[in-house]
Image (cartoon, helix red, strand yellow):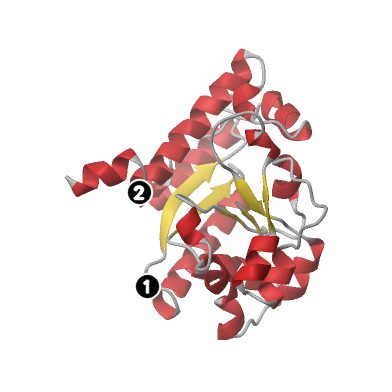
Amino acid sequence: MVDLDPQSDVSTGLDIQLAGHLNVADVLASPKEKVVRAAIAPSGWTRGRPGTIDVMIGSPSAINFDGPHPSIRDIWKLEEALSTVEKDYDLVLIDCAPSLNALTRTAWAASDRVAVVTEPGLFSVAAADRALRAIEEIRRGLSPRLQPLGIIVNRARTASLEHQFRIKELRDMFGPLVLTPQLPERTSLQQAQGAAKPLHTWPGDSAQEMAHYFDQLLDRVLRTARIGEYAEAAAR
């Protein structure tokens, strides 16, 4: 995980020990391998469990790299940094700030796919449309490999007529780009986040239901990127 949002929620939620590490702002200032590796820390989620989840630590100082008019050199800095370590990982996810300024464009330049996360409200629907237009702009102007993975609808309340209307509006506007399942609003997710614990280990049926939804979305990512079993299937 790359925590590119200056709020650094990913670093908090994934239970990162910050002491002794650099952070993503240091990486953007100097995208050399030794700096990159010094900014990466293991997630506490995997403590005592199999698997590896590492995080490039977020920092409020990343806001200094979020101007409205980044240079081409600035936009490619994260790609340059990740190229030094990407062989160590099967999948790299980048958490972006909710804006279309330099940090987000820097993330997209380093990406193959973009998942647009939105909520079923009037302003969020318009924001998703702007994000998809900006993705196309980056694809045409800078990075031909970039494509939208799709739109993830978050915090949906199926009993709400307004939410039903907005989800239909999203489907009418963007068709198959609207991914399933939609993520419902659940207190179990907020509780797990507050405790910096993985949802899959949180007790209760609600948590396991949400974990299953996230598994389905992750499966879509792996299938699109041809990772793991999907890489083997593509090679046959």
Q: Which residue is mark 1?
A: 144
Q: Is residue 188 left or right of residue 150?
A: right
Q: Is residue 181 visible?
A: no
In the rendered image, which quarter is residue 127 located in? bottom right
Residue 109's place in the image compared with 55, above or below, is below
Tag 2, which secondary structure? Answer: helix
**Residue 200 or residue 235, whichever sits in front:** 235
Instruction: Give whichever of 150, 142 is nearer the camera.
Output: 142
Q: Judge whether 195 appears above or below 140 on screen.
A: above
Label 1 amino acid?
A: Pro
Residue 163 spot, x, y in % from top left: 57, 35
Residue 25 seen by the camera: yes
Q: Earlier in the sequence, mark 2 or mark 1?
A: 1
Disc 2 to disc 1, C-alpha distance:
17 Å
Residue 77 spot, x, y in % from top left: 59, 75
Q: Residue under circle 2?
A: 224
